[in-house]
Image (cartoon, rainbow, N blue to C red):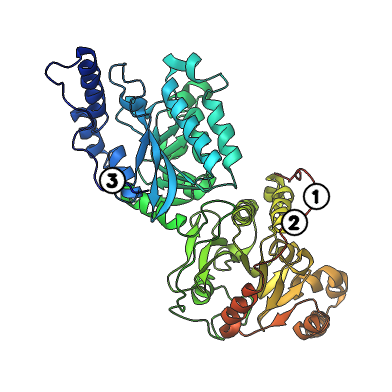
Amino acid sequence: MTTPSTQPEAPFAPSTEGGDARVGDIRGRLARAFEDSAAPSEKGRAKLESQHKLYVRERIALLFDEGSFVEDGRFANSTAQGLPADGVVTGRGTVDGRPAIVVANDPTVKAGSWGARTVEKIVRATEMALREELPIFWFVDSAGARITDQVELFPGRRGAGRIFHNQVALSGKVPQICCLFGPSAAGGAYIPAFTDIVIMVDGNASMYLGSPRMAEMVVGEKVSLEEMGGARMHCSVSGCGDLLAEDDAEAIELAKLYFSYVPSNWRSERPSYLAEEPSAPLTRHTVPEKESQPFDVHEVIEGLVDDDSFFELKPLYAAELVTGFGRLGGETVGIVANNSSVKGGVLFVDSADKAARFIWLCDAFNIPLVYLADVPGFMIGSDVERAGIIRHGAKMITAVSEATVPQFSVILRKAYGAGLYAMAGPGFAPDATLALPTARIAVMGPEAAVNAVFANKINAIEDGDERARYVADRRAEYEEDVDLERLAADLVIDGVVEADALRFELLRRLRYTAGRDRGFSERRHGVPPV
């Protein structure tokens, strides 16, 4: 089947002399409705320009391959005044040749708010995504529901709740990618929350259940919109946002880049690209030998993956743990890495949440995981206990346990306590546990262990020199007990490699994992500690 190379100049023919007046009237009204939804009003255009925003159709043109977009429901609510397409553009096209669906709010139509036809169009788009297992791009810029239409759009079986229901059904089935260009208010804020990635335009995007005005009225809090739900807050504090973009065009470019790493749905193969060597390959000096010396783990990641292929997620949030996609030999892998240059690489509540969600994402879309461990363990103290560090740590460990994609645990330096478990240590059936010669695996570090076991004896020794010798002897005994060669000899770890051989080792091991069994446990689903 061939498709026309060009579209007709005019969507509808003009009235013909001697023709049916009724048909001519219909054509005229449809032509006007089509034109009304083709461009913003002068007032709308001026507002977009003042906010440095693109018109909804300009956004879609940046997303899809030229000429590939097919729109649904363009005449929704066309009989109402001033509601072209009822404020949302939906349809499908191709992104770098791959079919996808888009749902895009038009902020020039009643601030992108939802009416009954808006909701119906969005529901139908999600049904199409479910039926055809197509990825869906959410271009969000909406003030929320129109209160005047609440009976028609809110409570029914095909009301707004159906959108969220379908999003949950789509989760892990197809990629859901959100660009947040403006507000996502009240119940509409859940649309980004149910997607796989949220890219927020700095200075324009916001997400909140209650506006600052409502917060002041209901709870007496005076707060700015940026403090309440701005892009930078969500990308660095709440974790609801993944990436900050400077403008609409960059947000769409980031969305397309993310899409280049993931398959089109849960059944598809990952995109494959030409392999490239790292720009700065790992050396035997990349990882400092002293575990107390912090270093930026990005150096290891960049030296491990293909040149310029690392795509980090949530870089501003819980930066003590680094997550993102890279390519090894042209194939997508997920990276989970402790970063000792931030808070010593200790795992906190937020970093455990960040890791769990990323691991679930990779597992859903058949993306192998590589863990780079340099972790003292989970944080301790009353603050984190009150915040639920045990529960959140268990969530991360649950995600590691349930993942059935190939997993490789690489011990860069220290892997102490439950930190070893959280980074897919030997007990969690990784495809391999590899260690650099700088690695240490133990319940805790030698200083902490000696103090924990021998504190009373140490304190009882009055002579300073004698006390120092006693501590040094006990430390030597402890280090001998967890010696790396002994761990390899006892088959705790599967191999020891130098950093400059790590990429080659992982590439070879990845080749043999393609046919693995993806089963974990026969049941409906677990009850994760969230």
Residue that numbered label 1 is attached to: 522
Q: Nearer the viewer, residue 426 or 381?
A: 426
Q: Gap between marks 2 and 3, in whole Å?
A: 46 Å
Front residue of 7 and 212 = 7
Residue 514 visible from this viewpoint: yes
* Residue 62 screen position, x and y as percent: 31, 49
User: Which amino acid type is marked by label 1?
Assistant: Glu
Above/below status of 261 relative to 52: below
Count residues near mark 3 (Cα–Cα under 10 Å), then give few for <14, some for 14-19, many for 20+: few
**Mark 2 or 3, closer to the camera:** 3
- Picture residue at 57% right of the left edge, 41% below the top: 170
Q: Are marks 1 and 2 in contact (CB under 8 Å)?
A: yes
Counting every numbered tag in the picture gives: 3
Q: Nearer the viewer, residue 387 or 129?
A: 129
In this rendering, which labeled residue sits more in front, label 3 or label 1?
3
In the displayed structure, 469 sits above or below 321; it is: below
Give the mark nearest the N terminus, 3 or 1. 3
Task: State how far apart marks 3 and 1 are (Cα).
Answer: 50 Å
N-terminal of the pair, mark 2 or mark 3, is 3
* Residue 299 position within the rendered picture, expressed as x and y whole percent measured from the top left: 50, 74
Residue picked out by circle 3: 4
> Of the residues shown, which amino acid type is indicated by label 2?
Gly
Query: Which label sits on residue 519?
Result: 2
Residue 415 tag number: none
